[in-house]
Image (spheres, rainbow, N blue to C red):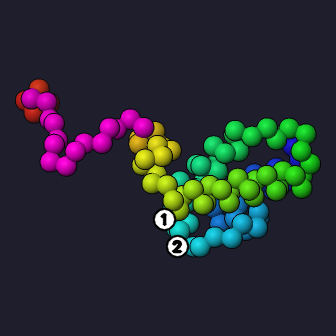
């Protein structure tokens, strides 16, 4: 593993990633959307081929991916983006239209 990846593996919080990669952020945005940002960041990295890159190129690529994930989180609704499994499996129910099957009530 490269020295850069070793440093990334040692990071513990979203703030640590932003600071280590030199990506500016607003604490209030990160406080509310940290999981969405980090999930989107992970997905962006997974889509990239990072083999053969030196530490500087990896750092730049990670910083661009994190900045893009942060920007997306400010404009995209997490539920509509379907980043988390819970959002992928539940279809939105129109207001005032809940359905409870009768057999679930009589058990």
Residue 41 appears left or right of 5: left
Q: Is residue 58 above or below residue 103?
A: below
* Quadrant for the N terminus in the image: top right
Question: Outermost residue, front direction?
Answer: 75
Is residue 6 among what the camera can see?
A: no
Task: Give residue 59's position: percent from left, percent from top.
Answer: 82, 56
- Assess whether residue 36 is covered by the magenta stretch: no
The residue identified by callout 2 is: 28
**Span of residues in magenta:** 88-102
* Quadrant for the C terminus in the image: top left
Q: Residue at x 14, y 48 (%)?
A: 96
Q: Residue at x 42, y 37 (%)?
A: 88
- The front one of 107 and 19 is 19
Is residue 59 among what the camera can see?
A: yes
Task: Give residue 53's position: percent from left, percent from top.
Answer: 89, 44
Distance from disc 1 to disc 2, alpha carbons, whole Å, reads: 7 Å
Q: Residue at x 75, y 58 (%)?
A: 63
- SS for dot 2: helix
Residue 43 appears left or right of 33: right
The residue identified by callout 1 is: 32
Which image quadrant is residue 16 in? Answer: bottom right
Residue 65 appears left or right of 102: right
Task: Give residue 95's position: percent from left, percent from top.
Answer: 19, 49
- SS for dot 1: helix
- Assess whether residue 96 is covered by the magenta stretch: yes
> Label 2: few (<14), some or many (≥20) within 10 Å?
few
Q: Is residue 18 above or below residue 56?
A: below
Q: Is residue 94 above or below residue 60?
A: above
> Label 1: few (<14), some or many (≥20) within 10 Å?
few
Tags 1 and 2 touching, CB below 8 Å? yes
């Amino acid at each position: 593993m490269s020295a850069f990846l070793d440093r990334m593996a040692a990071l513990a919080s979203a703030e640590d990633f932003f600071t280590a990669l030199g990506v500016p952020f607003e604490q209030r945005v990160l406080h509310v959307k940290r999981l969405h940002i980090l999930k989107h960041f992970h997905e962006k990295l997974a889509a990239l081929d990072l083999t053969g890159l030196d530490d500087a190129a990896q750092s730049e690529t990670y910083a661009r991916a994190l900045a893009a994930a942060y920007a997306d989180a400010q404009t995209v609704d997490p539920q509509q983006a379907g980043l988390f499994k819970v959002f992928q499996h539940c279809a939105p129910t129109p207001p005032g239209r809940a359905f409870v099957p009768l057999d679930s009530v009589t058990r």
